[in-house]
Image (cartoon, rainbow, N blue to C red):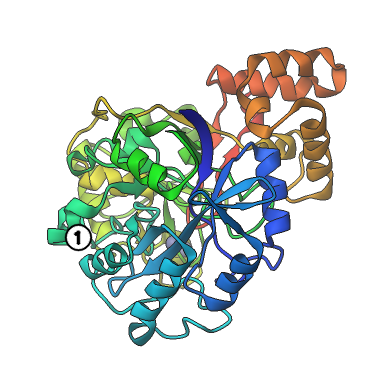
Amino acid sequence: MRQMHADLHIHSPHSIAVSKNMTLENIIHTCRLKGLDILGTGDITQPDWRSYLESNLEYKNGVYTYRGMYFIVQTELEDQESIHHVILLPTIEAGELLQLQIMDKAKGVTGQYGGRPHVNVSPPEIVEMVNDVGGVCGPAHAFTPFKAIFRSNKYASLEECYGSMTKYVYFLELGLSADTNLADRMACLETLTFLSNSDAHSEGPQSLGREFNRFYIEEPSFDEIVKALRRQQGRKITLNVGLEPRLGKYPMMFCKTCRIRYKLLTKDEVTPHFQSLPLHKTLFESYIIDGDDFVYYIFNSEEQLQDFRNRVGKKEVQCVKCALENKKSVISLGVFDRIDQIADYSQPKHPDHRPPYLGIIPLVEMIRVLKRVRSVKAKSVLKTYNELIKKFGTEFSILTDKTVLTKLRMDGTDYEPLVNLIEAFHEKKIEFIPGGGGKYGEIALEEI
Ligand SMILES: [Zn+2]
Ligand SMILES: [Zn+2]
């Protein structure tokens, strides 16, 4: 048996808003930088992408390969409830059979942007279709405020969604803004295996492989992956690696229009920082507007806070920032609030089989913040990133391996700020500005 790193959810240029540079060549280049061994193919029911894969991937001993990288046939489908499902299949031919099954229930499957189709069937019917072609499926980015099983006003348990087909669902994908600590507050997820996948829409190191799973398997085949998801014959996932949830796009409550993030506080959480800002009052609540990024609501009791959160969940609360500009826009629950709302436990209860979750800060985000530039895609950031990988090994080893950190320290003073930042990350001393409304969270550098 061996340990292999797998990212099992990506997209091709045939899905909306995906980089044209998602070619096999570019994809596997990033996989090597990140330290990945196995990758999902993405979008397998789209015929152009499928024939591109068919003519480039080699199939041997139950495994697809491209220049030393392993591939698992994969796609994502949206059902009639607008819930997304990650789907893993045994072969490219199974992808073609699935395409034939969905053809008369979905529009534009063969079109240029048919990679992630909306299929007019229920969640249990999705499971049934996937079973029919020998695949497995589970909810994608399960807690995000859009297109997900546990979003507001949708389902609060697995059974409500999948009904009698629940027994065929072996895994759930956590999504960028959730981790094992959050998901294990729901009793219905106890028997599921959690996947941490990137859902990459571009080939850069900020996207591809930002989340992955360490599998303990005999070989990198579909059969072995399924055994690991079902935790059979010693196969399993031994580590989930994913973004620190506050760095995700949807942890916080937010306004869809102005993208301001909301945080709910009880009186005893009010620090001197908040006291320096003007307090606004409505009939029942008080709030503070902190620049363009945050609104803080302050409540006298936990009950009042929960009541407010429930009203936000029902889309009954207007954005106060938009109201200032005479615009009307309701605010929405983020991942953290939604889990608080539907959780069975206030603290996580990890089942014995649950592997650790390593919440990481992408190396490009660390470099970005040290260079004090805005984008992780900036040329200067990628230059340093590539330099580091060339000298010291994969991104994963730079972030996690203490001997690599020692080498980095010995290399000279240039890397001293980065070494300090990685050390602060190991010691869990880094402060975050949590993301929300589609805006990624960031490291708060002033705090370190
Ligand atoms: Zn999705
Ligand atoms: Zn707003």
Question: Helix, strand, or loop for circle 1?
Answer: helix
Q: Give percent across and percent down for residue 56.
A: 66, 63
Q: Looking at the rendering, which quadrant does residue 430 occupy?
A: top right
Q: Point out the image quarter for the N terminus.
A: top left
Q: Give percent across and percent down for residue 319.
A: 40, 62
Q: Looking at the rendering, which quadrant does residue 399 occupy?
A: top right
Asked if residue 90 is positioned above or below residue 407 in the image, the reply reads: below
Q: Is residue 82 left or right of residue 167?
A: right
Residue at screen point 65% across, 45% down: 31
Residue at screen point 71% across, 39% down: 33
Q: Is residue 44 left or right of residue 263?
A: right
Asked if residue 43 is positioned above or below residue 235 in the image, the reply reads: below
Front position in the image: 207 or 7:
7
Q: Is residue 164 visible?
A: yes
Front position in the image: 147 or 33:
33
Q: Give percent across and percent down for residue 147.
A: 37, 64
Q: Is residue 42 left or right of residue 165?
A: right
Asked if residue 415 is positioned above or below residue 24 in the image, the reply reads: above
How many marks on residues? 1
Residue at screen point 77% across, 38% down: 385
Q: Residues within 10 Å of mark 1 (few under 14, many from 20)?
A: many
Q: Residue furthest front?
A: 61
Q: Looking at the rendering, which quadrant does residue 224 occupy?
A: top left
Mark 1 = which residue?
162
Q: Point out the image quarter for the C terminus.
A: top right
